[in-house]
Each structure stands twice: as structure tokens, then as C-alpha cells.
């Protein structure tokens, strides 16, 4: 069969190594698979299928240093997961039996108890039998935090198969952002990362949830999955009718040829591997120093990182050899003509690293403060009508008084003219059209505080490249939000004073768990500002996937959506908010909101602020295109994300209602949440259209004569000093917290 495209030249500078216990693992896994009922008689595999796929070779390449028993156990896990994939395909995907698939998946977590002594049901099929056996053999030697992480990764791997099945039923191809997010769960690479820990060393619990370790796992996952998509396109798309393949996703999104889509997937794959290396070499060492990790914990993180790297190179080598994938024409020989023979491989490595170096350099080559002219505003797809709160006019005056009282207008970052021009109550009035006057004030003040912080960090810390001071500031802000009754930090500047006031009023009636969720949303935002400062200091335009995921945080999306949830009460179980459909709904809305901001703020950020964190600029650098072309791509992505939001609301939430057996009150609350997010989307667009923060004339006036190298030398901690009493401001009612 003719291959649908020519396989690209892959970036893989690390040599694959083969575990010496390969034959032992092959023999053991074949006997184990037969004992679990996966071979003859299963209707899925014969012995010849298992031998042709050669999962022992996969594991020997991806785990080159573990001992024989560990390699055999890991190989059994991979035999199980590939058998599950094929079994689910034949039993439920081909028959499009979603109800049967859900019932099948619902039983599997019962075979993964966190306490090894918990009894499990009697297995009813080879997948259940295999999982029960593997779990019992694996977890005794691993810590409880690892068991929790691995069981969650396994459940995601299993349960997100329903997402693939739903897309097949609807004939729907995902958009690129949705696809990468869901592929991490469906593709199982986070699950593979757990087995890397088993083979190398457990990640210390105190850093397991940190951004650097999360990015290592996610970039590893993206690399594994995108590579697999290139090799498996022919089998999945042409034979199985699969729609969850990155090449097909980009082919559909860009309307390009299969070859062009494959080349674009390889570019993203390369970028993700570069991000992995950047994180491992810059962010992980800094994390180890900040958390004061002991030498043994540092060694564990290093071994785990090396294990993920081995998986990438070993997995690539296996794809070149396995009969499961198309691999004809894959580059094995030197690329340089005439370089064959002694020294040829070195020449090839040199050429490869030279090309990789050029790609890396592109991320650092942006020239700041270029004149780009007024921001071009496309026809933005917005299916929801905006409604403004009747309390808007009053909120405007009260926000000015509050900002004076907090000291926001007296630190040299903002003045009253800027506050009025930014008109943040307009944004609040669109986001929360049904709010009371007090509620609208609270929303306006949160938006003002977050926007002020977004301006404060780059101005105070960015131009001085003072990351140490920024981290101290961020830690103090977190201390302004007590959860268990501890006294808040005594505020020393406007940001701290504003946050203490907002936190006290917002969380007065919250449970400790709700407070933790709220504090987490604020912490995610302020921590993401540090990520921006770090990139700015390195003059590094971020990787596209890393940018999109971090931009949700820098835009304050979690904070504003948390404010939307405040009135929901206990009718919605927490696991519903954590479910795939709700997260997909929220992420699609967040991406639309933050990309709208990137479109309107392009001139402000690129020309006047020397900013590198703008989606249009990221697309320009990644695809090597001009501003109008990048804007077109970003607008297409916004449109697709908006359509995904509508798709989830119309098609996936009803299934969620049934899957969680929600009562009518909970269903009404979730439908109301969808409407709140619709208000959030239309309100954000309305604010960008009508405020005076991004217009060309406003920018020329505000930045006239501004020199970035002469930014005001503002202290981030100030001694307490008398401030205007909000109770004495004309027209300002005394707040309940005063």
C-alpha cells in the first residue's frame, strides 16, 4: 500500500539504547498474555500479532537501564494497554456502542485500589484480568502518591476513549488545541511517565505538581503522541476510520495537503522536544534550588528526566521497526550526500544539530519595539449577545474611590486617567450582567487588581530583570489569602492591600476547601507572571503549545471563571468540575477570551512594550509568516474554539448529565454556568471594543516619550502610610469590611 506522505526527518539527538534483558521480557510477556486470555480465542490477537508488534522491543528501547524483572513487568503493562486499545476498537468503536463502552470502562478502576489489601471483583475479560494482575504486582513497591498519580493517569487513558468514540459517532475532527489536550489523556504518555518512574526513580512528592515537572511530562507526552501520529496515520485514518490523529487535525484545520500537515506536525514535535530540553536545563535546576531538594531527591528528578529522554529516543527506534506502523522511507542513513561510511553518522549529527540550532535561535531572534501600526481587528465570531448590568455607571465611580483607598493610583504605575480609560467596570458589567450593585463592585475591583498586577510586574520587575524580587512579591501575595483562619499578611503596598481587602470580602462565607480553590486560582495567575518575566529575561518567544496553556493563567482566566462559580453552592460535585467536558468547555472559553486580548493588544504589546507574550507573535515566529497571515490563523483558531465551546455545551454536557446521573437542580446549575461563560465571552469582547486601553490614539498618547530603559524604579514593598479613607470619599458607601 502506498504511503500517504513522506515521513519527515525527525529531531532526535539522543541515541537509542537497548536493554540487555530483551529476550527475557519477550518470553515472559508472551506467556503472560496467553495466561490472561489475550491471544488465541480472544478475537483480538493471535501469537503472530504479538510477535509482530514486539512490545518487548519497545520496552527494551524505552527503558534501557532497568533490570530483567522490572523490564518484564513494564512490558506486561504495555501488552495490556495495547490490547485494551485494540479490544476497545473492535468491541465498541467499530460498533459505535458508547453505552457498552462506558459500562466497560466504569468497572476498570475497581481493579486499581490504592490500598493493596482491598479486594477486587472477579475479572470478566482479559483486560480486567490483566489490570488486576499488573496492579497487584506493581503497587507494593511504590508510594501512595505515585499510586494516586498512576491510577488517575490510567483512568484518563481509559475514560477518554469515550471522547474518541463520541467524535467517531459524530464524524467530528477536533481543533488543534483540543486535540493536543485530549491526546495526552487518550494517548497514554502521562501513564507511560508513571512507568518511567517505576523504572528509574519516583519524583519527589513536594515537586510532582510543580510547573517544571508538569511541563517535562506534558512535552514528553506531546512528543510521544505526535511522533506516533506520523507513523500511525495510514493505519488509523485510512484503515480504522480514526479521527484522533494530529496529521488529520492539522490537515482539516489548515485545509492543506497531507504532506504539508505531516511536516507541520513534525515542526510542533520538534518544538515540544526543544521545550522539554529548555525546561530540564533551566526551570528544573531553579526549582531544585528554590525547594532546597536534598541530593537524593535531585538525583531522582535527574534520573526521571533521563528516563523520559530515553523513552523518546527508544520509542522512535521502535516505530522504525514495528510492523504496527508505516515506516517505509524513514530516515535511518546520514542525510548528507556522500557522507556514508566512516564518520558519516557524525556528519549527520552535525547537520541535524545545526538545523536544530537554527530552529532554537528563531525563538530568541525577535527584535522588540518594532513599529507595527494599529492592531488589525478581524471579524471575530461571537454568537452570544452582550448584556450590560444596570449598575455600571455607579460601579465606575466606586471603583475609582476603591483604587485610591488601596493606593493603586499612587505608585507610579496607574493614575486616575488610566483607570478611567481602562473602564474595567464595563468588562465586569458584561461578564456579570445580573450581579447586584455590591457584586458588580467586587467583580470590577478584582478585574482592576488583576489588570494592575499584569501591568505592575513587567514595569517594576521586568525591565530590571529582577526575578528574585518578583518571587518574593508573589510569595507575599499568596500569604495575603489565609485559608484556615490564620491572620493575613500585613499589607505593604497597593497590590497586597487590594488583595487582602478583596480576599476578606470574597471568602467571608466560603468553606476552607472553596477558599483553597480560590487561592489556587490567584496563585496560578501570579505564578504565571513569573513565567512571563523569565521568558522576557531570556528574550525567548515561547513554544506555541506552552504559550496557549500558560496564557490562560496570565490572562487570569481561572480567577474570573472561579468568580462565575461562586454562587453554585454544593449542588455540583467537585468531580463534575474536574471532568473532561467541563474542563474542555472552560478551556475553549478561556482561549477565546485571551486570544481576543492578543488581537486587540498587538500594537500595544509589540510596538510599545517590547512584549513577546502575544499569540499572533508566537504564530509569526513558529510558522515564519507575516502579521496578517498570523492574525488569520489566530482568528481561525478563535472561531474553532468558540465552535468547540458550543459543541461541548450542546452535545457533551447532556452525556455528562447521564454519566454522573445528575439531578435536575444540578443540571440547571450547569446550564446556568454555560450561560455565565457565554456572558464572560461576550463581555470580554465588548470591553476590548469599547475601552481605551488598546486603541492607536490612546497608545500614542500614553506612551509618548516613554523609554523602557528609563522605567520608574518602583519599590515592591513600601512602608505603611496614611491613605484616603474610603468611608469619607464622596458617593462611596462604606464597605462591609471597612
Image (tube, rainbow, N blue to C red):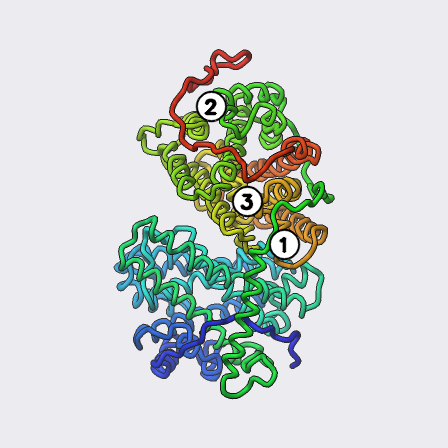
Give percent across and percent down for residue 125. 42, 69
Q: Tag count in the figure?
A: 3
Tag shown at residue 619: 1
Query: Which residue is at 37% across, 55% downward?
Result: 285
Give the crowd class for mark 3: few <14, some 14-19, many >=20 residues within 10 Å.
Answer: many
Looking at the figure, which quarter contains the C terminus? Answer: top left
Residue 568 visible here: yes
Query: Which residue is at 45% across, 57% downward?
Result: 279
Can you tell which of label 1 and label 3 is closer to the viewer? 1
Q: In which quarter of the image is residue 263?
A: bottom right
Q: Do the residues labelled 1 and 2 touch (CB within 8 Å)?
A: no
Instruction: Between residue 141 and residue 545, name the one nearer to us.
Output: 545
Instruction: Between residue 403 and residue 244, name the one nearer to us.
Output: 403
Element carrying mark 2: helix
**Whole-number angstrom distance, CA of label 1 to CA of label 2:** 39 Å
Can you tell which of label 2 and label 3 is closer to the viewer? 2
Looking at the figure, which quarter contains the N terminus? Answer: bottom right
Question: Furthest-right residue in view?
Answer: 379
Up-down relation of residue 139 to residue 678 (above or below): below
Give percent across and percent down for residue 112. 35, 60
Q: Mark 3 points at which residue?
A: 586
Give percent across and percent down for residue 43. 49, 76
Q: Are marks 1 and 3 in contact (CB under 8 Å)?
A: no
**Whole-number angstrom distance, CA of label 1 to CA of label 3:** 23 Å
Mark positioned earlier in the residue sequence (1 or 3)? 3
Mark positioned earlier in the residue sequence (1 or 2)? 2
Tag shown at residue 406: 2
Q: Are marks 2 and 3 in contact (CB under 8 Å)?
A: no
Give the crowd class for mark 2: few <14, some 14-19, many >=20 residues within 10 Å.
Answer: many
Residue 100 visible here: no
Amino acid at each position: 500500500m502506498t504511503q500517504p506522505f513522506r515521513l519527515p526527518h525527525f529531531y532526535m539527538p539522543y541515541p537509542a539504547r537497548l536493554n540487555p534483558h530483551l529476550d527475557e521480557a519477550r518470553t515472559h510477556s508472551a506467556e503472560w498474555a496467553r495466561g490472561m486470555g489475550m491471544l488465541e480465542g480472544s478475537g483480538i490477537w493471535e501469537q503472530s500479532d504479538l510477535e509482530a508488534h514486539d512490545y518487548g522491543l519497545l520496552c527494551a528501547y524505552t527503558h534501557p537501564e532497568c533490570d530483567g524483572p522490572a523490564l518484564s513487568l513494564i512490558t506486561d503493562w504495555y501488552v495490556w494497554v495495547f490490547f485494551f486499545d485494540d479490544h476497545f476498537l473492535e468491541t465498541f468503536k467499530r460498533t459505535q456502542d458508547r453505552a457498552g463502552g462506558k459500562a466497560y470502562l466504569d468497572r476498570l478502576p475497581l481493579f486499581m485500589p490504592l490500598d493493596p489489601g482491598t479486594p477486587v471483583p472477579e475479572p470478566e475479560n482479559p483486560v480486567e484480568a490483566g489490570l488486576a494482575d499488573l496492579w497487584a504486582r506493581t503497587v507494593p513497591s511504590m508510594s501512595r502518591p505515585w499510586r494516586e498519580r498512576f491510577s488517575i493517569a490510567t483512568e484518563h487513558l481509559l475514560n477518554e476513549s469515550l471522547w474518541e468514540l463520541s467524535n467517531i459517532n459524530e464524524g467530528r475532527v477536533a481543533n488543534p488545541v483540543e486535540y493536543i489536550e485530549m491526546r495526552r489523556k487518550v494517548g497514554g504518555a502521562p501513564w507511560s511517565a508513571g512507568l518511567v518512574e517505576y523504572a528509574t526513580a519516583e519524583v519527589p512528592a513536594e515537586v510532582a505538581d510543580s510547573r517544571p515537572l508538569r511541563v517535562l511530562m506534558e512535552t514528553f507526552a506531546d512528543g510521544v503522541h505526535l511522533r506516533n501520529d506520523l507513523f500511525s496515520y495510514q493505519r488509523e485514518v485510512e484503515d480504522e476510520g480514526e479521527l484522533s490523529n494530529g496529521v488529520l487535525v492539522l490537515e482539516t484545520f489548515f485545509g492543506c495537503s497531507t504532506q504539508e500537515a505531516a511536516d507541520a506536525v513534525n515542526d510542533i514535535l520538534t518544538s515540544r522536544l526543544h521545550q522539554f530540553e529548555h525546561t530540564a536545563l533551566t526551570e528544573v535546576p531553579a526549582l531544585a534550588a528554590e525547594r532546597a531538594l536534598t541530593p537524593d531527591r535531585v538525583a531522582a528528578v535527574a534520573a526521571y528526566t533521563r528516563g523520559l529522554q530515553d523513552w523518546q529516543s527508544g520509542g522512535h527506534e521502535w516505530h522504525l521497526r514495528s510492523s504496527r506502523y508505516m515506516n517505509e522511507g524513514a530516515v535511518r542513513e546520514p542525510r548528507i550526500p556522500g557522507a556514508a561510511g566512516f564518520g558519516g553518522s557524525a556528519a549527520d549529527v552535525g547537520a541535524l544539530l545545526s538545523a536544530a540550532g537554527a530552529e532554537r535561535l528563531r525563538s530568541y531572534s525577535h527584535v522588540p519595539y518594532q513599529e507595527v501600526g494599529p492592531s488589525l481587528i478581524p471579524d471575530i465570531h461571537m454568537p452570544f449577545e452582550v448584556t450590560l448590568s444596570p449598575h455600571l455607571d455607579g460601579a465606575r465611580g466606586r471603583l475609582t474611590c476603591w483604587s485610591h483607598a488601596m493606593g493603586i493610583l499612587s505608585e507610579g504605575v496607574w493614575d486616575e486617567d488610566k483607570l478611567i480609560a481602562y473602564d474595567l467596570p464595563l468588562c465586569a458589567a458584561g461578564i456579570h450582567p445580573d450581579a447586584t450593585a455590591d457584586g458588580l463592585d467586587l467583580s470590577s475591583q478584582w478585574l482592576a487588581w488583576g489588570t494592575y498586577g499584569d501591568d505592575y510586574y513587567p514595569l517594576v520587575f521586568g525591565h530590571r530583570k529582577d526575578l528574585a524580587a518578583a518571587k518574593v512579591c508573589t510569595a507575599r501575595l499568596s500569604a495575603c489569602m489565609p485559608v484556615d483562619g490564620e491572620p493575613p499578611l500585613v499589607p505593604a503596598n497597593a497590590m497586597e492591600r487590594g488583595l487582602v481587602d478583596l480576599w476578606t470580602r470574597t471568602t467571608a462565607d466560603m468553606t476552607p476547601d472553596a477558599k483553597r480553590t480560590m487561592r489556587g486560582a490567584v496563585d496560578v495567575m501570579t505564578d504565571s507572571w513569573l513565567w512571563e518575566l523569565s521568558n522576557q529575561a531570556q528574550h525567548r518567544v515561547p513554544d506555541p503549545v506552552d504559550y496557549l496553556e500558560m496564557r490562560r493563567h496570565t490572562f487570569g482566566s481561572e480567577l474570573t471563571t472561579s468568580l462565575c462559580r461562586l454562587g453554585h453552592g454544593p449542588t455540583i460535585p467537585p468531580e463534575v468540575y474536574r471532568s473532561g467536558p467541563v474542563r474542555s468547555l472552560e478551556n475553549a472559553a478561556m482561549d477565546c477570551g485571551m486570544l481576543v486580548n492578543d488581537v486587540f493588544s498587538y500594537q500595544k504589546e509589540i510596538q510599545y512594550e517590547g512584549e513577546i507574550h502575544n499569540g499572533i507573535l508566537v504564530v509569526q515566529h513558529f510558522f515564519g509568516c507575516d502579521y496578517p497571515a498570523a492574525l488569520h490563523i489566530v482568528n481561525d483558531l478563535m472561531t474553532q474554539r468558540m465552535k468547540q465551546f458550543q459543541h461541548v455545551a450542546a452535545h457533551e454536557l447532556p452525556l455528562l448529565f447521564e454519566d454522573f446521573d445528575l439531578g435536575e437542580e444540578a443540571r440547571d446549575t450547569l446550564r446556568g454556568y454555560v450561560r455565565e461563560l457565554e456572558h464572560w465571552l461576550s463581555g470580554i469582547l465588548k470591553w476590548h471594543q469599547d475601552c481605551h486601553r488598546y486603541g492607536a490614539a490612546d497608545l500614542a498618547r500614553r506612551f509618548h516619550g516613554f523609554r523602557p530603559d528609563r522605567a520608574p524604579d518602583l519599590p515592591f514593598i513600601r512602608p505603611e502610610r496614611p491613605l484616603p479613607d474610603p468611608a469619607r470619599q464622596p458617593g462611596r458607601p462604606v464597605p462591609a469590611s471597612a
